[in-house]
Amino acid sequence: MQTVFDPASSAAWNAIDTVLLDMDGTLLDLHFDNHFWLEHVPRRYAELRGISVAAAKKELERRYRSVEGTLDWYCLDYWSRELGLDIPLLKAEVEHLIRVHPQVPEFLDLLQAAGKTRVLVTNAHQKSLQLKMHKTALGDRLDLVVSAHDLGLPKENPAFWERLRRRVRFDPRRTLFVDDSVAVLESARSWGIRHLLHVLRPDSRQPARPRGDFAAVADFGSLTGGLRKFAQVLELSEEPGG
């Protein structure tokens, strides 16, 4: 049965054992990816093809849409072959734009203090994942990292979650999944994950997205208060005589 997760409630964390976390737009600022695919790649593609940036953007938008929601959309090797560009190298050119959303490190540390399992579940290609983990050091604050490319399906496919459960032991009834994509959240809901949370402002340079039918937060500051109280109560209960 679907429930609505209350991000401000410390009591809500009693029902959670595992927290599945998206990366791009959730833990990390989506500005990097938006700038890379919508500005940086078109400029480099225009230079390669000898066309205008506007023409490059138009062609790339068509190509992006043709594979949106599939593993190819997220695959750096696919785009390197399709566009004749070294996509991982181009990402390294603008890696200074990779940023962790505010309050994310504190949130991950509080999850550990609260005894929750922290699993990164991302559609990002392994090469992109490696770059971002190296740049942010978030891997030190996660218990496990899983790329959809390891499982052969994107998160938009409900069958992805069954494959994930074979890799990661979790009870969907006691799992919270946090993502900025409505399509991915709907996929997780249809498979049976009970607690879902929508991040409304994945790109810090853009306004918050409209609130839909999922519990939602604009940023992780809305989560830390209730989680901190839960962790403090847990710590007190584990003290001798607590």
Image (cartoon, helix red, strand yellow):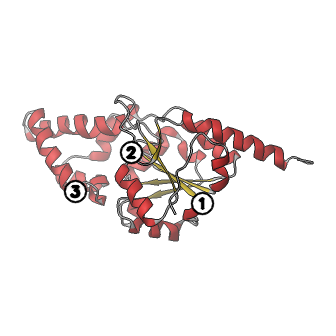
Nearest to viewer (mark 1 / mark 2)? 2
Residue 18 at x, y percent in the picture? 59, 56
- Local packing at callout 3 (Cα closer than 10 Å; few below 14, some 14-19, many 20+) is few
Residue 49 at x, y percent in the picture? 9, 41
Name the residue rendered at 68%, 38% in the picture. Answer: 228
Tell me the residue that label 2 is attached to: 212
Q: Is residue 17 above or below residue 239?
A: below
Please give left or right for residue 152 compared with residue 21 in the image. Answer: left
Q: Earlier in the sequence, mark 1 or mark 2?
A: 1
Name the residue rendered at 58%, 65% in the picture. Answer: 171
Tell me the element at label 2: loop
Tell me the residue that label 3 is attached to: 67
Tell me the element at label 1: helix
Instruction: Classify residue 206 by image quadrant.
Output: top left
Q: Find out whether the residues at labels 3 and 2 contact each other: C-beta distance under 8 Å.
A: no
Amino acid type for the residue under numbered disc 2: Gly
Q: Is residue 132 above or below residue 194?
A: above
Q: CA distance from mark 3 to mark 1?
A: 33 Å
Q: Earlier in the sequence, mark 3 or mark 2?
A: 3
Q: Earlier in the sequence, mark 3 or mark 1?
A: 3
**In front: 144, or 207?**
207
Nearest to viewer (mark 3 / mark 1)? 1
Instruction: Classify residue 34 by image quadrant.
Output: top left
Tell me the element at label 3: helix
Q: How many marks?
A: 3
Amino acid type for the residue under numbered disc 1: Arg
Tell me the residue that label 1 is attached to: 174
Q: Is residue 54 above or below residue 81?
A: above
